[in-house]
Amino acid sequence: MQEISNFIKTIMENDLAEKRVAAIVTRFPPEPNAYLHIGHARAIITNFELAAAFNGKTNLRFDDTNPAKEGAEFVEAIKKDIEWLGYHPNNVFFGSNYFEETYNRALVLIKKGLAYVCDLSQEEIAQYRGTLTEGGKDSPYRNRSVAENLDLFERMRKGEFKDGEKVLRAKIDMQSPNINMRDPVIYRILHVSHHNTKDKWCIYPMYDFAHPLQDAIEGVTHSLCSIEFENHRPLYDWFVKECEMPHVPHQIEFGRLNITHTIMSKRYLKELVESQKVEGYDDPRLPTLHGIRRRGYTPSAIREFILDTGLSRTNSTTPYEKLDYFLREDLKLKVDRPFAVINPLKVVITNYPEGKVEYLDAPNNQENEGLGQRKISFSRNLYIEKEDFIEEMPNRKWKRLAKDVEVRLMYAYFVKCNEVIKDDEGNIIEIHCTYDPETKSGSGFDKRKPNGNIHFVDASSSLKAKFNLFEPLLLEETPENKDKSFMERFNANSWKVMDGYVENYFKDAKPLNRYQFPRIGYFCVDKKSSLDNLVFNRICELKSTITF
């Protein structure tokens, strides 16, 4: 695996060398309100790999401060995704476990005259806040006494008020050029049952307030987050200081990773699922880790992809084909390469004996002898790819089968097409060939050169299969386009199903097993596959048009 190297690692090295920290502690703090996608994988891999580089620790902490949108389903899915990527948190925490401590820290602010209960509505608070160019104005409730604020906040906790009737706000600076510092809301009322604390609480801390306190409670040294939180850092530091936290964590921001033709917005992903444009959050076309896993990508390929994209303080975009490159690099020497025909054309070897079946030796992976060999059957009736035959050879560059042209069937014999059978509409439905028994693979026959080397599947022992071929969900490179709605840019041809055949080798295939189908691509057995209904997902093609 690539060694991690970026500006955050340099910061950590300096912090250790100058004894600002004794050990590195990072955390991955997802909100359990959705399924993780490959953008989250960047945060996971960055946190775990940086901590590991210094023999430090990484915690998994669920930011579960908004019970209206969160649930145990997402908690378990996130745990599974992180484990699948190959990481094991030193601790698993829940932000909700700190609710009592967070409440007490809010009392510290009230007693210091730095927080007050406000009766303005959400819309009024937004109006009072001002704009990026104009300062805000004070809430009429800003100068409530400490005693009144303590009383009202306790009554908020007891459930005496309705949702939205009151909030607790930090008292900072309504004229601050940083709009986040203009008396932000730090507690709101929500009479909603929580997946972890049930009905114990009806007030919940806001993310900007809870997050720095949770980092401090856990002893996090470097709190890594995406660049859009950069202007939240002064607020982060203010809460840690004024709440008198005994440990001081430091927030560091890095740029987001965007991938061409890829949707990494929770809102858009939810829209696709709810409109049934996709099968669900594990649809193989989605960038969710559940979808990526079902399609067949490996954790190793994802880690190498993320590490290769690097880390900076600016947002970056990388081609989606780059992930395919790392998938190929990971699998090319690891997986077997049995034959599959996804768009079959029947071939009859007219001079091969009826009823005869022979078994030929073939390597499982010609680049890795350690994967051993298998037997492939050969008989009078075969299947080849339709794309591997053309009636009249167009030019000398054509290196496949044509009428009166000879090719080698991989690990088998030379065959020549003598007759083409068509239906009433002129479509080719079958071709008749002859074979040369003296050209058996491995026989050393070298008197003539075939016009190519193509794969096949023996019809006598073949298994029917379905092949899912995917294209990007977005027709355009980027998900944002002010001139078109998101659904207008949805690729309706992003999932194509082909019917074909595979070797009998696949009779024991299990879901999520991966293979390389020679000349076609890398495939994974779908989760819905069975012996009676074999289904394969193409992870990626064998080659890319982009060079990395």
Image (cartoon, rainbow, N blue to C red):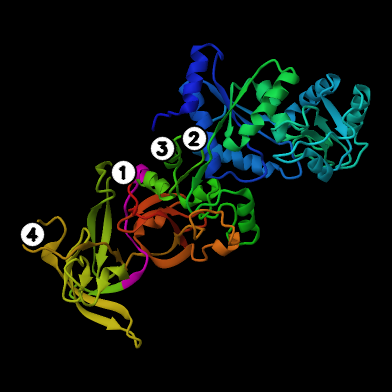
Image quadrant in which you'd find residue 104: top right
Q: Which amino acid is tagged 4? A: Asp
Q: Is residue 386 left or right of residue 482?
A: left
Check if mark 2's residue and mark 4's residue have beta carbons within 8 Å.
Answer: no
Disc 3: which residue: 308
Residue 496 vertical position relative to residue 127 in the rendered view, above or below: below
Q: Which residues are magenta?
A: 329-345
Residue 338 at x, y percent in the picture: 32, 55
Disc 2: which residue: 86
Q: Earlier in the sequence, mark 3 or mark 1?
A: 3
Tell which of 284 and 154 is nearer to you: 154
Indicate whether residue 143 is drawn in magenta: no
Disc 1: which residue: 333
Check if mark 3's residue and mark 4's residue have beta carbons within 8 Å.
Answer: no
Q: Name the front one of labels 2 and 4.
A: 2
Asked if residue 494 can be seen in this view, the reply is yes
Q: Residue at x 54, y 16 (%)?
A: 23
Q: Name the front one of labels 3 and 1.
A: 3
Check if mark 3's residue and mark 1's residue have beta carbons within 8 Å.
Answer: no
Q: Is residue 58 left or right of residue 354?
A: right
Q: Which amino acid is tagged 1? A: Leu
Query: Alpha carbon of mark 2 to alpha carbon of mark 4: how far?
Result: 49 Å
Disc 4: which residue: 446
Q: Earlier in the sequence, mark 2 or mark 4?
A: 2
Indicate whether residue 332 is drawn in magenta: yes
Q: Earlier in the sequence, mark 3 or mark 2?
A: 2
Q: Which amino acid is tagged 2? A: Gly
Q: Quadrant of the C terminus?
A: top left
